[in-house]
Image (cartoon, rainbow, N blue to C red):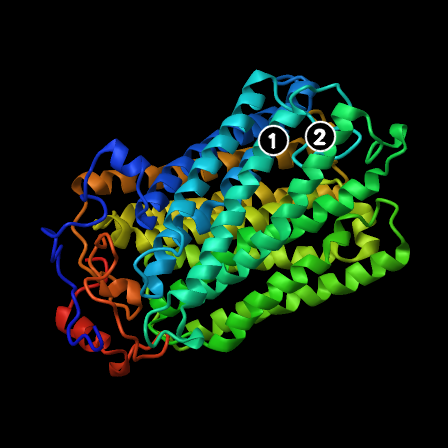
C-alpha cells in the first residue's frame, strides 16, 4: 500500500468482506477476543454505563440545589451523592474514556500495526476495569461514602463510614487497568510502527496518547500506594495520616495530588489529541506547528508532575513552597496555550466545514479557554485564599475536565463513528446535540463562577436564599445539557440499524485510518502499509488527491 491512487467515497465498498464486527459474532468470541477494536467497543459500552450512572448522581445534586433548603436529600445523603458522582466520573469515565475507547481502537491503525503489542494484557485491562467498577458500585449501593472523591483524611481514616475501603479498593484495582493500557500504548508506539512511519509522521493523536501513557505509568502507582497506606492506617491504627494517631493529614494531600493533578492531564491530553485531528481535518489544511504541538504534549506530561501543591495553598504548607508552585502553575499554562494558538492558526484561511465533529472541536476551544484562564486565577495564592472550597473551584474543574474531555470525546466519537461501525449518523441531530451540549454546559457551570466569587461554599446541601436564582439557572442548564448528552445515544444507536453505509473514507482525509475498510478488517490492513507521505498532507504527496476526489464527487463529506 505504498501509493494509493484512488479514494473511496462511495457507500460500503468491501462491505461483503469480513471485518472485526462480523468475524465470529458470539458473546464468547467477544469476551475472549484479543482484537483491540472489539475491546474498544466493550470499553465504549462499559464507560457509557458509568457515565450515565454518574449523570444520575449529578441530577440529584442539581435537583437538591434548586431550593435553598435541604429538602430533597439529607445532608449526609447529599455528601454520599456528590462523592459517588465524583468517584464514578473521575475514575471510571473521565480517565479511561478517550484512551480506552478511541486510543484502543485507533492507535494501532494510525501507526499501521495489526494490533497492540500485548493483546492479552489489553483484554486483561478491560477485565480489571470491570472488577474495579464492581467493587465501587457495590460500596455505593450498600451505603455509599461521604468523604468526597478526594478521600481526605481524617474523614477517610475514621470508622464512621465502613465502605470507604471498598471504594478505595475499587479505585486501587482500576488503577492497574490504566497502568497496563499505558504500557501497551508506549511499547506499541515504539516497536510496531509501519515502515516509513517516523516519529514526526505520527498523528498528533498518537503523540497525545504517548504523553498520557507516561503519566499513567508514573502517576498511578502513587495513588495506589496512598490508598494502601490509608488501608493500613484504618485496619492497624498505625499513625500515618490521622493526627489523632500521630499522623500527618497534609502528607495524604501531597501524595494524593501528586497523582491527581497529573490525572487531569490523563483526562485532557487525549482530548487535545482528538482536537488536533479535527482541526486539521475540517479546516482541510495541514496542522500549524506540528512539532510544537507534539512537544507541548510531552511538556504538559512533565510539568504536570510539578504543580500539585497549588491544590494546597490553604493547607498549611510553607509559603515559599506555595510561591514555587504558583510560579510553576503559570509555566504549565504555556504548552496548553501553544496548542490553542496553533489550532486557531490551523483554522485561519482554511476551508472550514462545520460538520458535527468540528462543532464539538470549536466548543472545546471555548470551554478550555475559560477553564484554563480561571486555572491561572486559582494559581495565584491571594485569589485562591478567597476562592478555595467555593463553587468557583467546581466551575473551573468542570470547564477543564468535563468541558474539555467530554467535548473532545464526543467530537472523536462522531468523527470516527463511520470508521468504527461502517455507518453514518444523522448530521442534523448531531449538530443539534453539539449546540445543546455547549449551551447547556455554559448555562450550568458559568453561574457557578459567580456563586463561588460571592462566597457560596461547595459540598453544602443548604445555602442562603440570595444564591437561589443562579442555582436555578444552573439546574436549568443541567437539564439542557442532559438532553444534549442523551441525543447522541439515540441517533448513534439508530444509525446502526438504518444509518447510511459509510465509505472507507467518508470525510475525504489522508490519515492512515482512512485507508482501510469501514469497519476495518480483523488485522486492520490487507497488507502492511508503507508510509511515504508527511502527516496531515492534503495534496498529491499523500498518494491521495483528496481535493480532486472531492471536486469529482460533488458531495459533502457526510452526504
Q: Residue at x 71, y 25 (%)?
A: 462
Residue reaching furthest to the bottom = 541
What is the number of callouts on the image? 2
Up-down relation of residue 536 to residue 373 (above or below): below
Q: Mark 2 points at which residue?
A: 231
Q: Does residue 162 appear to the left or right of 31 in the view shown?
A: right
Q: Which residue is drawn at 17% across and 69% down?
A: 7
Q: Does residue 11 appear to the left or right of 410 in the view shown?
A: left
Q: Nearer the viewer, residue 2 or 92?
A: 2
Q: Does residue 80 appear to the left or right of 6 in the view shown?
A: right
Q: How crowded is mark 1: few (under 14 residues within 10 Å), some or many (20 or more)?
A: many
Which disc, if any, is residue 23?
A: none
Marks 1 and 2 in Cβ contact (< 8 Å): yes
Dividing the image into 4 quarters, which one contains the C terminus?
Answer: bottom left
Q: Residue at x 81, y 46 (%)?
A: 386
Q: Where is residue 231 in the image (x, y as percent from the top left)?
A: 71, 30
Q: Where is residue 556 in the image (x, y as percent from the top left)?
A: 21, 63
Amino acid at each position: 500500500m505504498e501509493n494509493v491512487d484512488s479514494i473511496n467515497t462511495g457507500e460500503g465498498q468491501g462491505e461483503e468482506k469480513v471485518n472485526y464486527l462480523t468475524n465470529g459474532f458470539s458473546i464468547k468470541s467477544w469476551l475472549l477476543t484479543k482484537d483491540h477494536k472489539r475491546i474498544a467497543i466493550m470499553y465504549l459500552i462499559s464507560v457509557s454505563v458509568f457515565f450515565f450512572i454518574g449523570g444520575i448522581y449529578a441530577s440529584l445534586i442539581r435537583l437538591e440545589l434548586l431550593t435553598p433548603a435541604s429538602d430533597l436529600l439529607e445532608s449526609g445523603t447529599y455528601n454520599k451523592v456528590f462523592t459517588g458522582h465524583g468517584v464514578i466520573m473521575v475514575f471510571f469515565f473521565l480517565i479511561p474514556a478517550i484512551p480506552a475507547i478511541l486510543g484502543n481502537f485507533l492507535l494501532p491503525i494510525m501507526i499501521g500495526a495489526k494490533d497492540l503489542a500485548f493483546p492479552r494484557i489489553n483484554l486483561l485491562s478491560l477485565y480489571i476495569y470491570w472488577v474495579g467498577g464492581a467493587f465501587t458500585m457495590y460500596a455505593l449501593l450498600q451505603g455509599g461514602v461521604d468523604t468526597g472523591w478526594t478521600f481526605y483524611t481524617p474523614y477517610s481514616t475514621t470508622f464512621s463510614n465502613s465502605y470507604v475501603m471498598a471504594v478505595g479498593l475499587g479505585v486501587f484495582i482500576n488503577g492497574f487497568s490504566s497502568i497496563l493500557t499505558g504500557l501497551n500504548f508506549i511499547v506499541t508506539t515504539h516497536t510496531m510502527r509501519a515502515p516509513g512511519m517516523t516519529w514526526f509522521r505520527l498523528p498528533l493523536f498518537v503523540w497525545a496518547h504517548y504523553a498520557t501513557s507516561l503519566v499513567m505509568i508514573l502517576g498511578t502507582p502513587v495513588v495506589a500506594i496512598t490508598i494502601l497506606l490509608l488501608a493500613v492506617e484504618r485496619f492497624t491504627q498505625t499513625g500515618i495520616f490521622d493526627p489523632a494517631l500521630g499522623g500527618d493529614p497534609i502528607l495524604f494531600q501531597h501524595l494524593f495530588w501528586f497523582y491527581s493533578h497529573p490525572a487531569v492531564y490523563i483526562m485532557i491530553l487525549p482530548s487535545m489529541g482528538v482536537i488536533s485531528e479535527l482541526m486539521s481535518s475540517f479546516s482541510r489544511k495541514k496542522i500549524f506547528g506540528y512539532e510544537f504541538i507534539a512537544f507541548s504534549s510531552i511538556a504538559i506530561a512533565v510539568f504536570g508532575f510539578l504543580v500539585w501543591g497549588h491544590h494546597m495553598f490553604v493547607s498549611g504548607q510553607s509559603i515559599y513552597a506555595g510561591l514555587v508552585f504558583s510560579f510553576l502553575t503559570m509555566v504549565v499554562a504555556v504548552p496548553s496555550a501553544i496548542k490553542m494558538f496553533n489550532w486557531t492558526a490551523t483554522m485561519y484561511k482554511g476551508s472550514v466545514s462545520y460538520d458535527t465533529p468540528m462543532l464539538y472541536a470549536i466548543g472545546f476551544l471555548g470551554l478550555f479557554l475559560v477553564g484554563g484562564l480561571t486555572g491561572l486565577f486559582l494559581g495565584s495564592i491571594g485569589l485562591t485564599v478567597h476562592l478555595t472550597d467555593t463553587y468557583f473551584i467546581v466551575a473551573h474543574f468542570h470547564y477543564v475536565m468535563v468541558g474539555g474531555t467530554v467535548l473532545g470525546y464526543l467530537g472523536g466519537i462522531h468523527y470516527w463513528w463511520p470508521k468504527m461501525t461502517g455507518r453514518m449518523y444523522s448530521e442534523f441531530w448531531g449538530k443539534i446535540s453539539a449546540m445543546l451540549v455547549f449551551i447547556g454546559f455554559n448555562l450550568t457551570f458559568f453561574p457557578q463562577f459567580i456563586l463561588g466569587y460571592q462566597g457560596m461554599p461547595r459540598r453544602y446541601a443548604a445555602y442562603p436564599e440570595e444564591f437561589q436564582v443562579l442555582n436555578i439557572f444552573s439546574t436549568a442548564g443541567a437539564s439542557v445539557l442532559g438532553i444534549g448528552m442523551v441525543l447522541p445515544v439515540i441517533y448513534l444507536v439508530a444509525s446502526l440499524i438504518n444509518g447510511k453505509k459509510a465509505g472507507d473514507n467518508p470525510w475525504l482525509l489522508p490519515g492512515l485510518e482512512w485507508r482501510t475498510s469501514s469497519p476495518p478488517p480483523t488485522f486492520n490492513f490487507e497488507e502492511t502499509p508503507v508510509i511515504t507521505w508527511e502527516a496531515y498532507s492534503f495534496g498529491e504527496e499523500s498518494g491521495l488527491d483528496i481535493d480532486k476526489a472531492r471536486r469529482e464527487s460533488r458531495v459533502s463529506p457526510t452526504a
